[in-house]
Image (cartoon, rainbow, N blue to C red):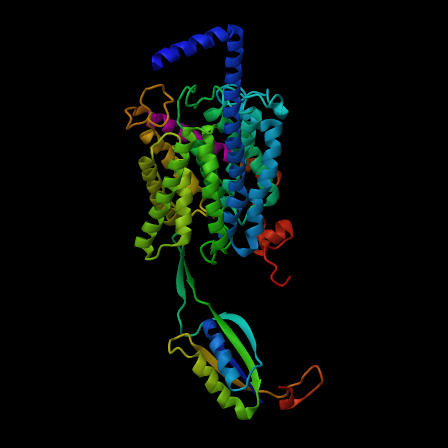
């Protein structure tokens, strides 16, 4: 099993969800986060006082999929999230040791 | 034919009506006219009183509340709200008497203590067509908003007990005497009976200069907020601030047009002047900002609007619409530079720009009232010219004297009162309380409980 963690532009979340649904993935957890990589922040001015806002709003999306489907999911996700500009985000992939469904104690891929 | 019938008709009437009967009917008619005027004036003045209260809560509470950080939104709104209660009690007990009782030039008498004798009968010195009770409650709303305006300077760092003691003493020893000097019977700066006749229609000097200058003193005395200049201190919700500023704009019609103290054409003229000045000021601030920063902001727009409202306050019942627009435009531009350029040069932390907007806007307004006041709008001096352009250059000097007295009283009074409060309750929140946020540390609440 692989855990796919993607940090994407907030306005791309609906497109990504739709793309994942198309390939049969509809379980995921998302978090509103703030951060930045190469994308520089922006300047805000309040009554002449300037603030450099570096940490920009992003959405973090986490999902665990069977290892065999990982590349397919990553492709669908990154195609949907890509605008081609700096700030589109990143995807990290982890090995997952175990998955447990709390309701009935299913284990492994059966729990996904 | 017509002349003949008229003659016959008047003869008949004359013959029919007994002189005594005619007198009675005339007296009845006069009474009915008076009561109709009183009803109209009273309706407008009660409405105005409610409008002015609306300026403090919700208007100012929202305007200021949105400008602070999330952790201080409630304490900032509390600074406005609590004064609606505190100043009201103070007003009923002594305030009205000190401000509007007949006393000497600087301090009113004590004849209205506990609102003694303040009832349905008009007080002819102030407003001959409305009950004195209406005049009293209308003036109270001004006394409430004035100390609330100062809170913009000490927001996010003043101890609540200190704030309460400060505003009580300040209202007693700075606001009431200033109101008496300008508006009270025999007041030193009164437009009609004053030794130095100043024109302050709705409180540019009494309300805005005193509060704005006192705000600067508070900002200097309390020192900067912790993290000022290093931590981000962005307004947490310009949505709230915009709603608040728009409520201020609407409420200000009660403030300025209500200051005619009657539903008269003077009220109309003050209403009109107020509106156009505000529009011009909002555009003025936004335009300068657009040129300087490349973007016009809504915070700039609403700040400009408030600056315009402040500046037109003393002038509203004295000027025609075009000078009103000029006054607004001047205030928008001047206050922008005060707040954005001068403040950062000097480095004082007037958190929400109470001084930059009210102190400076009020002073600009006081001077320009002396310039643009005209007998065409307000014939206070019985046919003689009113302002500089009308042919009375001395009025600028008189208004300047009024403004300087307000500056002086505000600086000295506020400094002494802060010293007293510092000794009795303390004025500055301790460091931990400030870091935690005043909402939690002073009031045990939070503005936004999203998980609830």
The C terminus of chain B sits in image quarter: bottom right
Q: Quadrant of residue A51?
A: bottom left
Q: Is residue B344 magenta?
A: no
Residue placed furthest toward the bottom: A68
Q: Tell me the magenta residue range.
A: B395-414
Q: In the rendered view, does B318 fall on the left or right side of B225?
A: left
Q: Residue at x 32, y 57 (%)?
A: B294
Residue placed furthest toward the right: A104
Q: In the rendered view, does B242 fall on the left or right side of B4?
A: right
Pinpoint residue B444: horizontal percent, then vertical percent. 65, 52
Q: Is residue B396 magenta?
A: yes
Q: Is residue B43 above or below residue B59?
A: above
Pinpoint residue B216: horizontal percent, then vertical percent. 45, 41
Residue placed furthest toward the front: B1
Pinpoint residue B357: horizontal percent, then vertical percent. 42, 42
* Whether residue A109 can be seen here: yes
* Main secondary structure type of the part rendered in magenta: helix
- Viewer-proximal residue among B409 and A81: A81
Q: In the rendered view, does A48 fall on the left or right side of B109?
A: left
Q: Is residue A33 above or below residue B403?
A: below
Q: Quadrant of residue A109?
A: bottom right
Q: Residue at x 52, y 75 (%)?
A: A60
């Amino acid at each position: 099993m692989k855990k796919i963690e993607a940090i994407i532009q907030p306005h791309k979340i609906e497109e990504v969800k739709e793309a994942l649904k198309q390939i049969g993935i509809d379980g995921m957890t998302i978090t509103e986060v703030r951060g930045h990589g190469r994308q520089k922040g922006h300047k805000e001015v309040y009554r002449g006082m300037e603030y450099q806002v570096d940490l920009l709003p992003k959405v973090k999306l986490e999902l665990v999929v069977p290892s065999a489907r990982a590349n397919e999911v990553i492709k669908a996700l990154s195609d949907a999230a890509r605008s081609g500009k700096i700030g589109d985000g990143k995807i990290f992939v982890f090995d997952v040791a175990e998955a447990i469904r709390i309701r009935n104690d299913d284990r492994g891929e059966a729990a996904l | 034919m017509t002349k003949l019938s008229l003659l016959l008709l008047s003869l008949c009437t004359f013959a029919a009506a007994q002189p005594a009967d005619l007198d009675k009917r005339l007296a009845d008619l006069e009474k009915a006219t008076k009561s109709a005027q009183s009803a109209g004036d009273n309706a407008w003045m009660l409405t105005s009183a409610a409008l002015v209260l609306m300026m403090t809560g919700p208007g100012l509470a929202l305007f200021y509340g949105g400008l602070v950080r999330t952790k201080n939104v409630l304490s900032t709104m509390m600074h406005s709200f609590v004064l609606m209660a505190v100043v009201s009690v103070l007003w009923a007990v002594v305030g009205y008497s000190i401000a509007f009782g007949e006393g000497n030039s600087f301090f009113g008498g004590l004849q209205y203590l506990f609102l003694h004798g303040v009832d349905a009968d008009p007080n002819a010195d102030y407003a001959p067509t409305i009950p004195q009770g209406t005049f009293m409650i209308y003036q109270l709303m001004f006394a409430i908003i004035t100390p609330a305006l100062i809170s913009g300077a000490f927001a996010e760092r003043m101890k609540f007990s200190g704030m309460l003691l400060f505003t009580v003493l300040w209202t007693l020893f700075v606001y009431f005497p200033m109101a008496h000097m300008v508006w009270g019977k025999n007041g030193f700066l009164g437009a009609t009976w004053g030794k130095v006749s100043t024109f302050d229609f709705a409180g540019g000097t009494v309300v805005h200069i005193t509060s704005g200058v006192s705000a600067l003193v508070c900002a200097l005395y309390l020192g900067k907020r912790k993290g000022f200049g290093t931590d981000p201190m962005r307004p947490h919700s310009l949505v709230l601030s915009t709603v608040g500023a728009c409520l201020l704009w609407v409420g200000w019609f009660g403030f300025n047009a209500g200051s005619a103290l009657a539903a008269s054409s003077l009220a109309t003229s003050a209403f009109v002047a107020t509106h156009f000045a505000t529009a011009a000021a909002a555009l003025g601030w936004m335009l300068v900002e657009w040129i300087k920063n490349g973007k016009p902001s809504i915070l700039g727009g609403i700040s400009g609007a408030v600056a315009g409202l402040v500046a037109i306050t003393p002038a509203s019942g004295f000027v025609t619409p075009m000078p009103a627009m000029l006054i607004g435009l001047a205030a928008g531009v001047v206050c922008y530079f005060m707040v954005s350029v001068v403040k950062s040069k000097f480095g004082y932390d007037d958190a929400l720009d109470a001084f930059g907007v009210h102190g400076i806007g009020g002073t600009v307004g006081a001077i320009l009232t002396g310039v643009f006041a005209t007998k065409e709008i307000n014939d206070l001096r019985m046919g003689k010219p009113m302002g500089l352009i009308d042919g009375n250059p001395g009025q600028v000097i008189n208004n300047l004297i009024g403004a300087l007295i307000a500056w002086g009283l505000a600086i000295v009074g506020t400094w002494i009162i802060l010293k007293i409060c510092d000794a009795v309750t303390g004025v500055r929140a301790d460091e931990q309380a400030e870091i935690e946020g005043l909402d939690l540390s002073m009031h045990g609440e939070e503005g936004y409980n999203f998980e609830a």
